[in-house]
Amino acid sequence: MAEYRHLVRIANTDLKGERIIGIALTGIKGVGPRFAKAVCIAAGIETGKKTGELTDTEVKQLEKVILNADMNLPKWMFNRRKDPEDGLDKHLITNQLVFAKDTDLRDMKKLKNYRGMRHAFGLPSRGQRTRSNFRKNKGKSLGVKRKA
């Protein structure tokens, strides 16, 4: 058996060695449970294997599949399809994902479209009601006045 490691570094993220690889990969920002399972299958690694028991070649294979997600993975699993800049289907992780989200929000605010303005004012942008919820952004709670 190979040497057991308590921390395994994949895609600039430290993963705990005692967790199984299918769950440990979800610790990487931008990788969910279904994507993690698909990555394991594409890399040829059993999803129930402990992260600390992976060999160096298996770690490199996992990192290769995660960073170049277009290898044998369906396009609908990607988190950035038809990127506005270049029109390609991508799967972004870690800092790339944060930067892309911030750029999208900044562009919406600059265009002054509906969603951009809602983000700028700190209001919900997906049609939720605002009378009772989102009070932390609007001030004190509404109440009923008592008779004098």
Image (cartoon, rainbow, N blue to C red):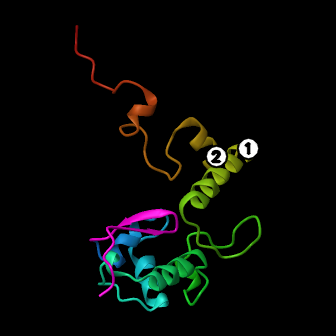
- Disc tally is 2
Q: Quadrant of residue 132?
A: top left
User: Which residue is painted at 66% across and 76% down in the image?
Assistant: 89
Q: Which residue is mark 2?
A: 116
Does the magenta segment cover residue 12? Answer: yes
Q: Which residue is mark 1?
A: 110
If the image is split into quadrants, where does the C terminus sit?
top left
**Residue 44 sits above or below residue 82 on the image:** below
In this image, 17 relative to 100: left or right? left
Q: Quadrant of residue 32?
A: bottom left
Marks 1 and 2, the one that precedes in the sequence: 1
User: Which residue is painted at 68% across and 44% down in the image?
Assistant: 109
In percent of width and height, residue 1 lies at 29, 88
In this image, 32 relative to 75: left or right? left
Element at badge 2?
helix
In percent of width and height, residue 144 lies at 27, 23
Question: Of the residues shown, which amino acid type is indicated by label 1?
Answer: Lys
Magenta region: which residues? 1-18
Element at badge 1?
helix
Q: Residues within 10 Å of mark 1 (few under 14, many from 20)?
A: few
Spatial CA distance of label 1 from label 2 is 8 Å
Q: Are marks 1 and 2 in contact (CB under 8 Å)?
A: yes
